[in-house]
Amino acid sequence: MLLKEEVLGRNEAAYAREEKSVPRQPEEDEKACFRGLGFPPPPRKSVVVVVGYALTSKKTKSFLQPKLEGLARNKGILFVAIDQNRPLSEQGPFDIVLHKLSGKEWRQILEDYRQSHPEVTVLDPPDAIQHLHNRQYMLQEVADMNFSDSYGKVGVPRQLVVKRDASSIPDAVSRAGLRLPLVAKPLVADGSAKSHELSLAYDRYSLQKLEPPLVLQEFVNHGGVMFKVYIVGEAIKVVRRFSLPDVSRKELSKSAGVFPFPRVSCAAASADDADLDPSVAELPPRPLLERFAKELRRRLGLRLFNLDIIREHGTRDHYYVIDINYFPGYGKMPEYEHIFTDFLLSLAQSKYRKRSSA
């Protein structure tokens, strides 16, 4: 294993180009930032937190943008790529390991590393992440919470899991009492293109055209707007996204078939600047989201995820969680650079306090 100073030396050149193009925070602002977190102000170019990352090339490109790396550098955070061809225990030392890779082998490597390096914060535990990769269980914690307070109620749409035999789906839907239309989602939610291939089924008999294994979820009219709730530790950021339009009973009676629809919550479908009906555009109350997210973080054992939330059209306070994604596209979240670097520093602050009190 390399000393931290050697890790920094190997990565100094990689940051030289970025520092020329990314403006630094004023020195006094930087010092105030560290004092507020309980650290002594570091000298210029010192590194407080080393973050090892194991991400796909696509995730690396979307997440580790120059602005994030430059801001992190100014705050004393260094991102170091983990070499998947070398034993993880021989790399580092790391303060934090950030990851989003799939496969049993990687999960076992990471779990072994967590056990042998308890001083390193792993974001997040692989077993907890795996829970979100199966839509049969993904929303179970939300359903079990049955969350309700003075600001509103948060639940999940009724759903049915179908693992095989498409011909049995119409009868299974009738027995479960689900109402059409139904959203069909692949059972596996691993971030692949296939896991995002969703369809809307308008009539009972067309359900036989679907390909199990899948989850059928009741479609809830929501004014064509979804709220994407990004969670980074205790921080919450909400953005509006255009979604599927409402389906009237009249339209349902005249429609038949199963229709695929594209990913509707991408950044290009932002509804933040659109001229919308206030009753549709109004964001969920902040206190509701804070209380709900805090409890869900505890139940899931995760700190990096987002929620796709809709408000039932015609109500002011009835919300549904329709999907949960681990380590989502934070690059699409406004101000993600500041939010994420503050989060990483808060983790370092927590470790610093524990060491000080030991």
Image (tube, grey):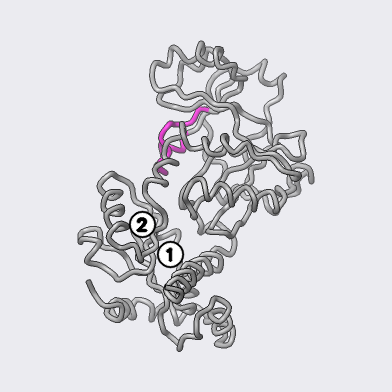
Q: Please give the residue where the numbered disc 2 appears in the rendered image.
A: 55
Q: What element carries label 2?
A: strand
Vertical order, 135 against 21 (above or below): above
Q: Is mark 1 on a helix, strand or loop?
A: loop
Looking at marks 2 and 1 on the same chain, the residue that comes earlier in the sequence is marked by: 2
Query: Which residue is painted at 79% across and 46% down in the image?
Result: 278
Quadrant of residue 131 in the image?
Answer: top left
Q: Is residue 127 toward the left or the right of residue 288 in the image?
A: left
Q: Where is residue 193 in the image (x, y as percent from the top left)?
A: 41, 40
How many neighbours does mark 1 have within 10 angstroms: few (below 14), some (14-19), or many (20 or more)?
some
Q: Position of residue 274 (x, y in %)?
A: 71, 50
Q: Is residue 189 toward the left or the right of residue 330 in the image?
A: left
Vertical order, 235 against 300 (above or below): below
Tell me which amino acid carries mark 1: Leu
Q: Is residue 56 toward the left or the right of residue 280 in the image?
A: left
Q: Relative to the observer, which residue lies in front, 43 or 193?
A: 43
Position of the N terminus by quadrant: bottom left
Q: Where is residue 301 in the image (x, y as percent from the top left)?
A: 47, 50
Which stretch is magenta? 184-197
Tell me which amino acid carries mark 2: Leu
Q: Where is residue 314 in the image (x, y as percent from the top left)?
A: 77, 33
Quadrant of residue 235 in the image?
Answer: bottom right
Q: Residue furthest right?
A: 278
**Mark 2 vs 1: CB contact within 8 A:** yes
- Is 167 covered by the magenta stretch? no
How many neighbours does mark 2 have within 10 angstroms: few (below 14), some (14-19), or many (20 or more)?
some
Q: Residue 243 carries which label?
A: none
Position of the C terminus by quadrant: bottom left
Q: Relative to the observer, which residue lies in front, 115 or 66?
A: 115
Query: Which residue is painted at 45% across and 76% down in the image?
Result: 356
Query: Which residue is painted at 50% across and 17% down in the image?
Result: 207
Q: Please give the residue where the numbered disc 1 appears in the rendered image.
A: 64
